[in-house]
Image (cartoon, helix red, strand yellow):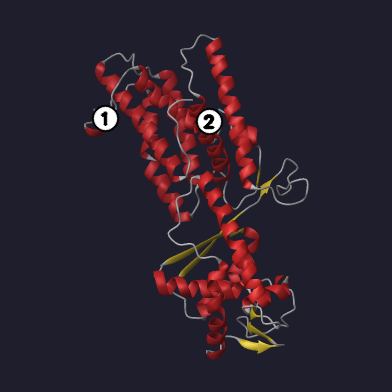
Amino acid sequence: SQRETAKLHAGDPENVALWQQFMPACLAGLHETYRRLGTLPFDHEHGESFYNPMLPDVVEDMLAKGIAAASHGAVVIPNAKGNIPPPERDRKKQKEDPAAIVRKSDGAFTYTTSDLATIKYRVDHYAPDVMLYVVDARQALHFKTLFAQARRWGYASLQLEHLSFGSVLDEDGKPLRTREGAPDELLPLLDDAIELARKSYEASYEVRKEFGHDVSELPPEAVQEIAEAIGSGAVKYADLSQNRNSDYKYDPEKMLAMDGNTATYMQYAYARCRAIFRKGQVDDAPFRTNPPAVVIARPAERALALQLLRFEEALTSAAAEYLPHHITGYLWDLAKAYSVFFENCPVLAADTPEVRDSRLLLVDLTGRVIRQALDLLGIRTVERM
């Protein structure tokens, strides 16, 4: 594979032709995954090969500036102490201050070369203040080296951040894998979660119907749409609700639980907010254009109102530290506060019109905050569950 990589970098016609055949299928697979996840289209898609023509210039520029030097037939950027170890030495043994190979002795370029070319291209074309690399924590040494070399190359003022993340584990605490030993693919996991969500929804419908609740049967396509929102949301939320640096176990049933810090619970809380307006045949528009005064009559109302005021704080914290689990943690606190409010503060049957309108406002605000927070996490809400 190393020989073929070197030939591809050198523009070997056979390798280039094969690459041109493979790429459309690879991109189609990625786009299908993005579609299933509800990912917004990218403004630009530049794979590693996009930068291949730029790699020789990166190496030559570093040689000309004295940043890199020839060593054993390769081109290496010395470490901060000026040391150039043999290129075949394992870089992982140089934990604190490794050198970086930018061209191997066989002429092939490295990930470091490609990443340096990427930095230069992005600075030249987009002039960013910050560049974020969302990559497995096991690549920490690579990015530590890359950022150090980029600073030496003239990008000291550019903020480069490696946003590492942990592994998804199976029930035995091992990285999630199939029986064949290859990492499990995302789409089958999504399919399983969606199917489990559909069965759970249908079972819940039958139970509610059996106990005499007023439930309306939805057409199959509507049930499938709800199942997809719940299933895909469960997988996303399970990932985003963890500290991104931590490992976590993949547990579909736990992800879809109707209690606890799960997307399903948040979606259910949102659906309960919307159900109150439907049941009371209340138009929510006036509560948004001309909201009534908030009347605090019970402790649960105060607790919910204070929790709603913390939304901005949670967003600011998540953005500043690149930690989306600050949003999910906030949602969990909000959903718990709303549950206590729901059980202790009658809304449609409130004692006075003023209290009724105040509680309707709190319900509407809760639903809107849940929906916005989930939307920021790429998770859909549903009007009925």
Q: Position of residue 242 (x, y in %)?
A: 57, 45
Q: Which residue is mark 2?
A: 224
Location of residue 353 (image quadrant): top left
Residue at x 41% of width, y 72% of height: 125
Q: Amino acid at mark 2?
A: Gln
Q: Is residue 147 left or right of residue 340?
A: right
Q: What quarter of the picture does the N terminus occupy?
A: bottom right
Q: Position of residue 90 (x, y in %)?
A: 74, 74
Identify the secondary structure beneath mark 1.
helix
Binning the other alpha carbons within 10 Å of mark 2 as few (below 14), some (14 to 19) or many (20 upward) gives some
First in sequence: mark 2 vs mark 1: 2
Residues 347 and 124: in front is 124
Location of residue 70 (image quadrant): bottom right
Residue at x 64% of width, y 76% of height: 13
Q: Is residue 151 left or right of residue 4?
A: left
Which mark is in front, 2 or 1? 2
Residues 322 and 191: in front is 191
Q: Which residue is mark 1?
A: 285
Identify the secondary structure beneath mark 2.
helix
